[in-house]
Amino acid sequence: PLMCQGSGNSYFSLLDYAIDEGLLKKEGSSYVFVHDQIQNAAYSLIPEDERGRMHRKIGYLIMEHSPEDKIRDLLFLVVDQLNRGEVGKEERETTGLAKLNLKAGKTAMSEATFLRSASYFEAGIGALYDSHWEEYYDLSLELHSLLAETQYCNGCFEIVGKIATIVLNNAKSLVDKLPIYINLIKSLGARNRHQSAIEIGITAVQELGIQWLSPSPDKLRIVADFINIKLRFEVMTTDDFLAIEEMEESKKLAAMKLLILIAYYAYLSKQEYIPIVLTQMLQLTLQHGICNESCTALADCSYLLLQSMDIDGSKRLAELALLLLEKLQAKKYLPRVYAVIYAGIFSWCYHLKLSDKLLWQGYQEGMLIGDIEFAFVNAFSSLQNRFLYGAQLTLLEKDIELCRKRMIEYGQASQFAICSPLQRAVSKLICCTGDPLSETDTIIHEKETSDISLTRTNFLLDATTYIHFCIVEYIFGIYDSAADKIQERWIMEKEYSRTSKYYGSTDFYDCLICVAMARKSEKEKWVTLAKSTRSKVKEFATFGENNCDHKCLLLQAEILDVEGNAEDASSCYDAAINAAEKSGFVNDQAIASERAGDFYLRHCDTRSSHYYDKARDLYHQWGALAKADHLYKSTPS
């Protein structure tokens, strides 16, 4: 836009002439070139050695003649002109330019335009003299800290590391170094360097004077300490909880910010640290007051309690986390709290479909405020839940691909890796390379099976890889491979001292695979395992009936059948199909219909064709076209 200043009409008559010649057009009170090429041609007429002075003059003229209430609207225009102009020689002018770039960068951050904000922070740093750390410490620290934050959001992790080196060499206190430590830790975590992220976090916490308790051989004591501190919150009335004073001591606040990062990366790779970190955070909250980070501590505790099936405790701490999030208006931590609660206790107790909107809100808020990692944690959790409750696969595949592209764009290698097994599972169900029973596909399958291996460093990635692999193997009837993998996963879970539950879905497929194996060999062994895993699904059904009732009915039918109780099995298959339809799990309804078809075929009952036809229709409805085709080719017509 062209802005004219002057008291006479001569400027405007010249502009009107340009409009008549088709060079300009008027938009409101502004004049704009009709085409970029015309603007470039006009700009080229200005001698190169005069352009800098002109940009600088334009910038200051806009500032001088703009009303106070309009200067914010013109901030980017002013700063862009000044940044393209000649740098003044007076220290006051260069410092003023740095401050304007700081203001513009913050404004761009508030609009989630992180590339633009980074350019302003870089320009602000460039405007300062070499001695700026001594003479303008606060300004230098803020520009560098915010540049690191925006470059983390942009996925430029190497740049974050370089900025961190500069700040850590110049910052005067650990509290001043905190923003850099946080972005450095998150940058390492985003690249799957979880151990390094944890080590830096622990070092910083210790420098703040917070005692770090290394994992003790006495695991019972660690668990006892955690249970004691969580009970103090659990029995607290809501009024008493909300009456806790806010934390004020800067070092304790800094420690809380670091501890929440350690907790997350410990969840991914160093599980023995989790109860230690959460116990410390809850103790700091009780002793020194609540803070924004207390929301995440309570939410994380809620999630941890699910491992021990403490549903009531998990619900109460999740409730406290949400209450505190609302009281403190801690929007900065909304993405993390939502990811933990709505992919945690909420999805355990309510229909998986109800979590979609809330997890998507967590994703959008995370992208807006720059919590990129937890934005994608929310996104993956939403995609995962959609797969488990039988959302339409072709639409889901498109959303997965879009999400994976954005993960690459923002350098989120960790989340991209975790999302990949889901993408592969969906892709195989939709489209197979050919006949799943052909020799070529058998060779391809054997290669994929051999490629599945444990990372031994990332439980979530390991669990996700095995679970999705086994789901697809089971659905396509490749039971021996699926059985091998669930036994490997059980060993892995013992090593991690954690289980991967997925709201009962993991145990559901484990049980189905065990029953399938019982029909082939070692019946007593596999039936015993099937009954054990079924009992876990029944436990889920006590508080999450919408997700698990139909699963329990199908498992009951399968076990009754393998034990020879055909009459009761028959009615259970129908009950499972009807319950799955009522709950809206088209995927499980399709599986139940196929198992009923198998049941009647084994008993030479012509009703098998009805159930197979129903199963094929349901697989089509789900979008599992490859499976529908596989069922058509592998069952009697």
Image (tube, rainbow, N blue to C red):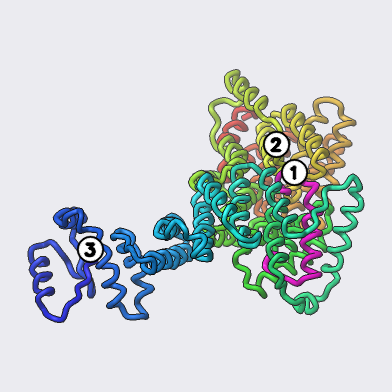
Q: Residue at x 73, y 49 (%)?
A: 267
- The magenta stretch is 266-293
Q: Could you say which is closer to the camera, residue 486 or residue 266?
A: 266
> What's the residue type where badge 1 is placed?
Thr
Mark 2 to mark 3 CA distance (whole Å): 63 Å
Q: Where is residue 511? Give x, y as percent.
A: 79, 39
- Label 1, secondary structure: give it: helix
The quarter in which the C terminus is drawn is top right
Mark 2 or 3 closer to N-term? 3
Q: Could you say which is closer to the camera, residue 244 or residue 97?
A: 97
Mark 1 or 2 closer to N-term? 2
The quadrant where residue 327 appears: bottom right
Q: Where is residue 392? Give x, y as percent.
A: 56, 48
- Label 3, secondary structure: give it: helix
- Label 2, secondary structure: give it: helix
Considering every residue shown, the one lying at the far top of the view is 439
**Left or right: where 108 falls relative to 356:** left
Q: Are marks 1 and 2 in contact (CB under 8 Å)?
A: no
The residue identified by callout 2 is: 466
The residue identified by callout 1 is: 506
Instruction: Please tell me whether mark 2 or mark 3 is closer to you in this view.
Output: 3
Q: Main secondary structure of the magenta part?
A: helix
> What's the residue type where badge 3 is placed?
Met
The residue identified by callout 3 is: 54
